[in-house]
């Protein structure tokens, strides 16, 4: 009985040591190094259940990304890691993937929107994707892009 209790207490003590962690203060300033550190840390700062729920794939690309980045899961602030849940509706079944990142706040771009949901000139997109202008204009029409 003594050993499990000791383990739990040591975990709690180590998780409240400000030198070991920098749990993000979401109400504080955010800079290139992430959020400033919360002054008081609890075990709840290291628990995130947002990845348990299936993402809503009822959208144009039939996909949903559920991030556990520092903005959603402040416990990863400053640790150089994060994770996201990726739900894909493919045909008759759903697919699920977990994606890990080497940053607590990685940039995330969905290529379809990055290329076709903006006013990037079609000739530039032609050069970078090898699609022809008609295909690009069709995709821009579907995704709301112009140009
Ligand atoms: C999923 O997203 C669609 C499109 O935005 C929306 O109409 C629907 O209510 C959402 N479903 C759930 C369960 O949130």
Image: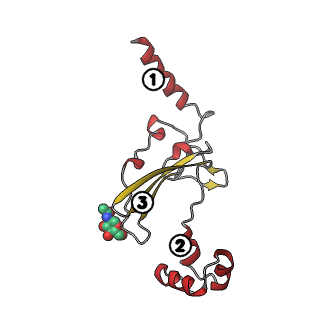
Disc 2 versus disc 3: nearer the observer: 3
The answer to which of marks 2 and 1 sits earlier in the sequence is 1
Precedes in sequence: disc 1 or disc 3: 1
Residue 8 disc label: 1
Q: Is mark 3 within 8 Å of ligand 1?
A: no
Residue 25: x and y in percent read 54, 48
x, y percentage for residue 131? 61, 79
In percent of width and height, residue 104 lies at: 59, 49
Q: Which mark is residue 88?
A: 3
Q: How many marks?
A: 3
Disc 2 versus disc 3: distance between alpha carbons? 16 Å
Position of the N terminus by quadrant: top left
Task: Say few, some or many: other residues with alpha carbon within 10 Å of mark 3 (under 14 / 14 to 19 / 20 or more).
Answer: many
In which quadrant will I find the C terminus? bottom right
Place of residue 89 in the rendered image (x, y in percent of width and height, measured from the top left): 38, 62
Measure the C-alpha gap from mark 2 to mark 1: 46 Å
Mark 3 residue element: strand
Residue in the picture at 42% in, 48% down:
51
For label 1, the SS is: helix
Q: Quadrant of residue 14?
A: top right
Q: Is residue 81 above or below residue 11?
A: below
Residue at 41% x, 49% y is 50
Q: Report helix, strand or loop for mark 2.
A: helix
Measured along the vertical axis of the image, is residue 22 above or below residue 87? above
In whole angstroms, how far apart are the C-alphas of marks 1 and 3?
38 Å
92 horizontally vs 14: left or right: left
Mark closer to the chain start, 2 or 3? 3
Residue designated by label 2: 113
């Amino acid at each position: 009985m003594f050993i499990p209790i000791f383990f739990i207490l040591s975990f709690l003590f180590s998780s409240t040591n400000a030198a070991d962690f920098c749990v993000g203060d979401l109400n504080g300033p955010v800079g290139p190094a992430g959020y400033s550190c919360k002054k008081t840390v609890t075990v709840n700062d290291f628990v995130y259940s947002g990845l348990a729920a299936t993402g809503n794939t009822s959208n144009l690309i039939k996909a949903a990304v559920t991030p556990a980045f520092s903005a959603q899961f402040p416990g990863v602030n400053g640790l150089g890691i994060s994770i996201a849940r990726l739900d894909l509706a493919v045909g008759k079944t759903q697919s699920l993937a977990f994606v890990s990142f080497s940053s607590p706040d990685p940039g995330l771009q969905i290529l379809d929107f990055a290329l076709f949901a903006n006013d990037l000139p079609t000739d530039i997109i032609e050069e970078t994707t090898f699609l022809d202008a008609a295909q690009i204009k069709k995709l821009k029409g579907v995704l709301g892009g112009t140009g």
